[in-house]
Amino acid sequence: MAYKISSACVSCGSCADVCPAGAISQGDEQYVIDPAACLDCGSCADSCPNGAIAPEE
Ligand code: SF4
């Protein structure tokens, strides 16, 4: 399991700043989470002003 960023991402970068694992980086069109590095802590989801981050189904 890992968290995933949806297309609602506006590339503000808030999530990358709070991720304790450094799993979030800026992709071509939006921020992306490396599922191999994600610790499933949920910090990024709480930080997103757009509600774009949720646990992967
Ligand atoms: Fe990083 Fe936690 Fe978000 Fe995973 S759930 S990307 S470890 S902040």
Image: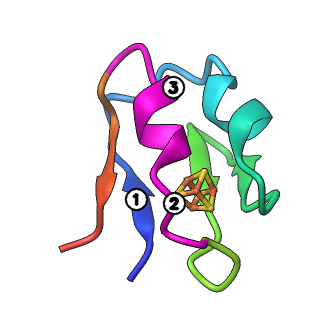
Q: Amino acid at mark 3?
A: Ser
Q: Of helix, strand and loop, which one carries label 1?
A: strand
Residue denoted by label 1: 4
Q: Disc 3, ligand 1: is the CB inside 8 Å?
A: yes
- Which residue is most to the left? 57
Report the disc number at residue 41.
Answer: 2
**Residue plotted at (53% across, 41% down):** 44
Q: Amino acid at mark 2?
A: Cys
Q: Residues within 10 Å of mark 2 (few under 14, many from 20)?
A: few
Q: Residues within 10 Å of mark 1 (few under 14, many from 20)?
A: many
Q: Amino acid at mark 1?
A: Lys
Q: Is residue 26 magenta?
A: no
Locate the C terminus by quadrant. Answer: bottom left
- Disc 1 vs disc 3: which is toward the camera? 3
Is 10 positioned to the left or the right of 21 in the image?
left
Residue denoted by label 3: 47
**Residue plotted at (78% across, 32% down):** 17
Residue 17 in the image: above or below residue 26: above
Tell me which segment is drawn in magenta: 39-50
Q: Residues within 10 Å of mark 3 (few under 14, many from 20)?
A: some
Locate the N terminus by quadrant. Answer: bottom left
Report how far apart the C-alphas of labels 2 and 1 lie in the structure: 12 Å
Residue 22 at x, y percent in the picture: 82, 57
Q: Disc 2, ligand 1: is the CB inside 8 Å?
A: yes
Q: Of helix, strand and loop, which one carries label 2?
A: loop
**Residue plotted at (57% across, 38% down):** 29
